[in-house]
Image (cartoon, rainbow, N blue to C red):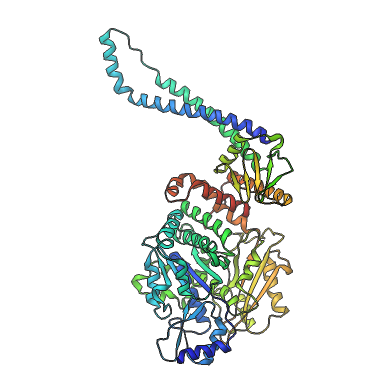
Amino acid sequence: LALHKLAYGVAKEAPLAPNPIVVSCMGHAGVGIGAEAYRWILLDVGADPKAPSLKGEKEQLEILRRYGGTILRFGASMRRGEVPLVPRALLVDLDPRSANLILQSYPELFAMRDKHALYGLGGAARNWAEGRKRFMEEIEKKQDVQTRIRSISPEPVRGFILPFSMGGGTGASFSSEFMRYTKTSGELGYSTIASFGILPEFGWDPVIYGPSHISITMSLAHQMKYSDCPILLDNKTMRAHGHRLGDLLNKRSSIVDDLPKQLQVGWKEYRNVNLISAHVIAEFMSSFIRETEWDMSNYRTWLAASKPRFVIPWLMPIVPQGDSNFQSIQKQMSEGNEGVLFDVEEDGGRVEAGPKDSACILVKAKGNLEAPERNFFKKIVQDRYEIEDKRIIFVKVPALQNEPASCMVLLNVHALGKRLLPYVKEAEDVWDSYKDEYGKRGLGQEEFKQSVLDITGHLA
Amino acid sequence: LELSELEVIADQLLERQKELDALEEEINRLELDLHEFPRKSVGEKKFYALIGMNWDEPKIEEKLKELSEKRDAISKIISDENGKIVLALSEKNLIVPLDPKPIITGGSASFRYRGNSTYSKAIQELANVLGLSVPLKVDDVSIEHDKITVAEMDPHYAMEKIVGAFDKISKTVALKLGETPRSLSR
């Protein structure tokens, strides 16, 4: 009763929380990155990621202001006077081991235990067609996905965030089918989807060259069709930054550090790379969980008529440090703590401008974003990309006391199409050798070629 | 390249493809004969000796060489013709002779080919180049042998969508023609 009174008291005074957003982590990489993103966002505001909870009424209001209940919900209390905060997260994989490890290592964070996990019968899919078929048979048919989403988030869901790797089989295919399922499933169809697809680094990541291109092509086609905000990340560049800024990243705690050493299942090598991806997702989430003026659906409006629809996180401080003032961002930029996460031209040369190229700059800092601060960012962007002032969107995210200031420049540029087309060409070139294998698992020539047609027409 | 020209080329390609298939079959049979020849010839020679007749050694290798050369020549013609089609498509040089006035029925606009012409082989060839089947569907546009239908009632938007569909086809064909992409070792 006391808890109910407390919750009622909080609800009465706090701003009305918008409908929630569920983070659906797809495949091994997606699960690791999604969980890491939650950790990042909690650490940034000084919460204990092992067991974030509301203690006093003042703190409750503060936390509700930080998150707005968008990505976290109240859990059942285990300690007197404390209400745990539980991520609205679904960890989806073919194999139960990766999700289980996260759940076991963070039993109080992922307090709803098995409800957070959706998994198939085990193993991985190195083939997009196999992954999709198994998602349909082992997850869609056997489990009521809508009910599972409701159990994580009883309120109507207004959005999904999907982190996944595009080069393997499971993450790319699961996210593709999940997006299709969501957009064609009644009320869920109105929700906004933001996908975070990670392009692999060939010769480094555990992906098979030919099939990986087919996965990337099918994933691009599905993101183009079903994702309202498809954001692409580049593992090669992130690994380079992970190596360059290893000292800083090693000081920052990661979910990998809390996993049993003998069971780190491939995440250890990706610790610093995944931390960077998690930072991107956390920064994206903070743009609408604390701000009432900018909503996740604004990203949908931004990109609705864009060609290509894809977005890249271009520039950001990799490991934000210092205080929450704007000058702290400038200092980090000058000290080389910043990084270009995804560049359109590999050699760093001038990029061919598109007439409708645009940018969305997220600035998390205390105080107002006045003309000098805005000009600082405009100059950085316009030195490299010919983007008109009027096509630059600024989103100011309030930073909390003691939270390091940070920023992220999201770009939607025409030249990105050219950067992505070689993946499609390679997929097209290898298709004949693999078509029988894929055909047996439900991806026929017609569907593949149609996807090539769609994505080429869009990107070229 | 006009669709009517493509129809003629596609018809010729079809004939040549049939010829090529028949040649391939014959070559396969001869290769098998050649493989079996050392084993069979011993018995045949003895048989002919027994019946008191001369045994003429079959000239399998010569025949095989002749047919293989013919096959290569036809393959080259097919490949060259396909190349021309692909190039014409990629350079947006295909003229599609549609009647500009559509028939609006049931929420869609249908544009018939001028003079009520049909182009079954040309459209099939177009689908083959893309690896798709007929009717060729590109977004809201359905390309068939006797008409092009657009899920759009406004003729102006329907026209735009048809142009968009052929633009998409052209870009996809251009991707096939494109040089090996720059290093993807990322």
- Position in image of residue B78 (x %, y %): 56, 32
- Position in image of residue A460 (x %, y %): 63, 52
Residue occupying the far top of the picture: B52
Task: Judge whether residue A244 can be spotted in this image.
Answer: no
Question: Looking at this view, is A384 or A436 the one in front?
Answer: A436
Q: Is residue B32 left or right of residue B94?
A: left
Q: Is residue B56 left or right of residue A429?
A: left
Residue A368, picture quadrant:
bottom right
Residue depicted at 71% across the width and 75% down the height = A375
Q: Is residue A460 positioned above or below B74 on the image?
A: below
Residue occupying the far front of the picture: B106
Question: Looking at this view, is A67 or A426 the one in front?
Answer: A67
Residue depicted at 65% across the width and 60% down the height = A349
Residue depicted at 51% across the width and 72% down the height = A22
Q: Is residue A433 positioned above or below A74 on the image?
A: above
Q: Is residue A89 left or right of residue B91?
A: left
Question: Looking at this view, is A147 or A399 the one in front?
Answer: A147
Task: Judge whether residue A204 can be spotted in this image.
Answer: yes
Q: Quadrant of the N terminus of chain B?
A: top right
- Position in image of residue B107 (x %, y %): 66, 51
Residue A91, picture quadrant:
bottom left
